[in-house]
């Protein structure tokens, strides 16, 4: 009886997600587009000086994956927003109507196979742009853009979250896609961004772009990476941009056989390119160091001839869902990240760089005070981290919000309690001209036992004190990757106030 029923389901193409951990518990697809005016505030009070919108996005599978299995970074982009207005918080969630989403909606099933592998698509989707718009959200030049590193951005209405369309900067961007980790310099109102494998799968071209305050391409540099690999994030300072190349490589022959988009090459070094912010390809400076890996950068800075990159660095890949090239099993101990400062001497004549671990805590999803990206220096940083006083519930247990002050080495954390996890904290200044770190941290909290989410509003100068307010959602926001806080004045004017002084 059961098998007949299953056959019937299969015949009509019923939606049923595979019974694997990825889609169980808090990871179960939500697929819900919701509007909730005046969310419940279950403790404290929402500060009335916090006015603007918190945007985040993450993957939320529209249909069960074609192959029956998947990696968690795949899935259609779901954007969530929390609009803060005079102590009130309104919630909204919407799928991004990418080309991929729309063709799958028409056919009522997944049409894209293995992650980023174009050779495993359904032939119907062969000429469809593949982006899921599931990684990051940025407000720049009066446009709200949702990003995934294998496609152009998608523009959304900043208030309704209605998809306006795929955006290629009026044809001026010549790479075939753009990174999901641009960095915004809120003082110059420039967006610094890039593309890797910029001419297509397996190419070594890197395109670095400066988008001006008017949203138009202002400067670009094309150069070649040491290999065709992943460049998920980069960092910027006042005078330089820093591109680390970790040995997670793409091989088109492997793709043609239906294989993974990346494999980890533990026999290769780390290579770093430092490019003058408005420089040219012949000014790119190269450095080399021990094999290492990082997903995300906290920030870059410049001190005389020294350039620093603060990065959540591990000895081996922490993206365990991409296999080792040599067929060995992944070693989780090699993939544990710590915030580490890499220092490069632009006046020296060596290719080596200094490596200095800054804190003992395991941490990822690093952020700074957004007004201090593109600055000469910065001192405040925020992460999700492992609370050394608590036993991990699994994995490396990055279930706390951490707050760092680099010059003093001070590290504080807030743990949301049992059966809870946290997502990347985002900084919101109290006022446009508040000092660095004076403001709030906004972090989604996963209430695993209750299968729903809270939004915690923390004092960014004292996370240990616990939330100033907890905003309750009656439902679950599946893991989101990144996003940003956009203050009301930046939303209404399309520009950020130039307030940095350091
Ligand atoms: Fe990321």
Image (cartoon, helix red, strand yellow):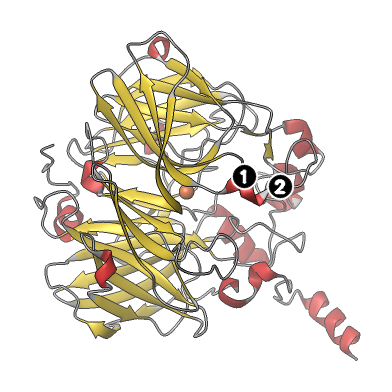
Where is residue 103? Give x, y as percent. 61, 58
Which residue is found at the position 37% from the left and 27% from the top? 343
Q: Is residue 17 above or below residue 480?
A: below
Q: Is residue 225 above or below residue 423?
A: above
Relative to 126, is 3 on the left or the right? right
Determine which of the numbered discs, if any, sits on residue 330 in the image. Answer: 2
Q: Is residue 148 visible?
A: yes
Which residue is found at the position 23% from the left and 20% from the top? 304
Residue that label 1 marks: 334
Label 2 or label 1, whichever lies nearer to me, is 1
Where is residue 37? Give x, y as percent. 29, 82
**Label 2 element class:** loop
- Find residue 49 and report its image quarter: bottom left
Q: Check mark 2 vs ligand 1: CB closer than 8 Å? yes or no.
A: no
Quarter the N terminus occupies: bottom right
Relative to 384, is 44 on the left or the right? left
Where is residue 88? Give x, y as percent. 20, 78
């Amino acid at each position: 009886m059961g098998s007949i029923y299953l056959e019937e389901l299969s015949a009509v193409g019923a939606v049923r997600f595979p019974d694997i951990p990825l889609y169980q518990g808090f990871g179960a697809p939500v697929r819900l587009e919701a509007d909730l005016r005046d969310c419940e505030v279950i403790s404290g009070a929402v500060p009335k000086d916090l006015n603007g919108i918190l945007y985040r996005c993450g993957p939320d599978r529209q249909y069960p994956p074609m192959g029956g299995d998947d990696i968690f970074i795949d899935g259609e982009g779901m954007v969530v927003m929390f609009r803060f207005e005079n102590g009130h918080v309104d919630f909204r969630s919407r799928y991004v109507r990418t080309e991929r989403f729309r063709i799958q909606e028409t056919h009522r099933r997944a049409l894209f196979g293995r992650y980023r592998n174009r050779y495993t698509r359904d032939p119907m989707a062969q000429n469809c742009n593949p982006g899921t718009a599931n990684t990051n959200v940025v407000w720049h030049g009066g446009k709200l853009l949702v990003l995934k590193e294998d496609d152009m951005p998608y523009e959304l209405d900043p208030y309704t979250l209605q998809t306006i369309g795929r955006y290629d900067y009026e044809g001026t961007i010549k790479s075939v896609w753009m990174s999901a980790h641009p960095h915004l310099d809120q003082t110059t109102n420039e967006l610094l961004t890039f593309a890797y494998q910029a001419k297509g799968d397996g190419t070594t071209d890197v395109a670095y772009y400066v988008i001006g305050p008017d949203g138009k391409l202002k400067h670009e540099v094309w150069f070649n990476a040491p290999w065709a690999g992943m460049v998920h994030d980069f960092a910027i300072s006042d005078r330089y941009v820093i591109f680390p190349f970790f040995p997670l490589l793409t091989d088109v022959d492997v793709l043609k056989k239906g294989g993974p988009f990346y494999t980890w090459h533990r026999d290769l070094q780390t290579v770093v390119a430092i490019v003058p912010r408005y420089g040219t390809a012949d000014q790119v400076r190269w450095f080399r160091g021990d094999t290492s890996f990082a997903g995300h950068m906290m920030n870059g800075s410049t001190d005389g001839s020294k350039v620093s990159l603060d990065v959540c660095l591990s000895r081996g890949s922490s993206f365990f869902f991409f296999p080792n090239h040599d067929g060995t099993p992944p070693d989780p101990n090699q993939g544990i990240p710590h915030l580490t400062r890499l220092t490069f001497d632009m006046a020296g004549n060596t290719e080596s760089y200094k490596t200095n671990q800054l804190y003992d805590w395991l941490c990822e999803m690093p952020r700074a005070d957004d007004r201090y990206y593109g600055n000469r220096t910065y001192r405040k940083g925020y992460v999700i981290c492992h609370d050394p006083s608590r036993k991990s519930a699994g994995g490396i247990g990055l279930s706390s919000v951490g707050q760092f002050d680099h010059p003093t080495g001070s590290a504080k954390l807030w743990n949301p309690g049992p059966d809870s996890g946290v997502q990347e904290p985002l900084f919101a200044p109290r006022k446009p001209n508040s000092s660095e770190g004076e403001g709030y941290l906004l972090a989604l909290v996963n209430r695993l036992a209750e299968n729903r989410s809270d939004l915690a509003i923390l004092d960014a100068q004292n996370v240990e004190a616990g939330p100033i307010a907890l905003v309750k959602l009656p439902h679950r926001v599946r893991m989101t990757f990144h996003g940003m806080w956009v203050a009301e004045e930046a939303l209404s004017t399309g520009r950020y106030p130039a307030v940095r002084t350091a």
